[in-house]
């Protein structure tokens, strides 16, 4: 909000930028793991290609990790962008305290 307010952008732009970053980060992470930048250009990382998962328990752990991360991403996305239509406005704590304070103490 601090950066968008002087530009007079709509309120939804903050959530849009956060959503783009959340979608782009895993893609950038995978590309950074699989490729390396050399003086000759971008090449496939030799370390990533040579590491082969041979153990079946390691493969199951990889799948379980991917499923778990996917579930977390879906839950966070639903909570962030799913929004409920039944939001009830609340009174700020200071306003509530001011309403209950005796009239003799107010200035």
Image: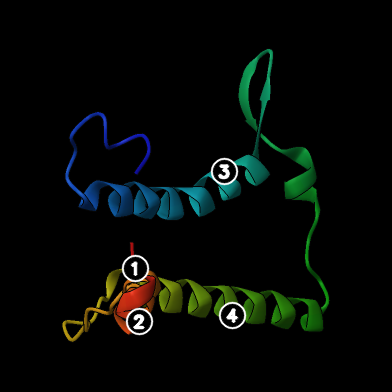
Disc assigned to residue 56? none
Q: Earlier in the sequence, mark 3 or mark 1?
A: 3
Q: Above or below — where is 33 with respect to 57?
A: above
Instruction: Please report whichever mark, 3 or 2, sits nearer to the chain's N-terminal start.
Output: 3
Q: Nearer the viewer, mark 4 or mark 3?
A: 4
Which residue is located at x 34 percent, y 68 percent?
Answer: 106
Marks 3 and 1, how far apart in space? 62 Å
Task: Please identify, in this view, whether the residue under mark 3 or under mark 2 is nearer the observer.
Answer: 2
Q: Which residue occupies 27% across, 79% down?
A: 90
Quadrant assignment, res 10: top left
Residue 91: x and y, percent?
Answer: 28, 77
Mark 4 secondary-structure assignment: helix
The part of the image, by quadrant, that contains residue 81 is bottom left
Q: Residue furthest top?
A: 39
Residue 72 placement, left or right of 81: right
The residue to which callout 2 is attached is 102
To which quarter of the image does residue 107 belong? bottom left
The percent coordinates of residue 55 (x first, y second) are 83, 77
How many residues crowd mark 2 within 10 Å: few (<14), some (14–19), many (20+)?
few
Q: Position of residue 39 (x, y in %)?
A: 69, 13
Instruction: Please tell me whether residue 68 is drawn above or below residue 13 in the rendered image.
Output: below
In what element is the residue under mark 1? loop
Mark 3 — residue?
31
Q: Earlier in the sequence, mark 2 or mark 4?
A: 4
Q: Secondary structure at mark 2?
A: loop
Badge 3: how crowded within 10 Å, few (<14), some, or many (20+)? few
Q: Nearer the viewer, mark 3 or mark 1?
A: 1
Which residue, given by chain and number where applicable, does mark 1 sit on?
106
Q: Which mark is residue 68?
A: 4
């Amino acid at each position: 909000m601090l950066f968008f307010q002087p530009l007079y952008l709509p309120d939804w732009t903050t959530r849009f930028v956060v959503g783009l970053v959340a979608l782009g980060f895993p893609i950038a992470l995978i590309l950074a793991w699989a490729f390396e930048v050399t003086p000759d250009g971008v090449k496939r990382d030799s370390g990533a290609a040579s590491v082969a998962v041979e153990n079946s328990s390691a493969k199951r752990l990889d799948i379980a990790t991917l499923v778990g991360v996917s579930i977390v991403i879906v839950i966070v996305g639903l909570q962030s962008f799913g929004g409920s239509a039944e939001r009830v406005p609340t009174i700020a704590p200071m306003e509530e305290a001011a309403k209950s304070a005796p009239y003799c103490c107010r200035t």
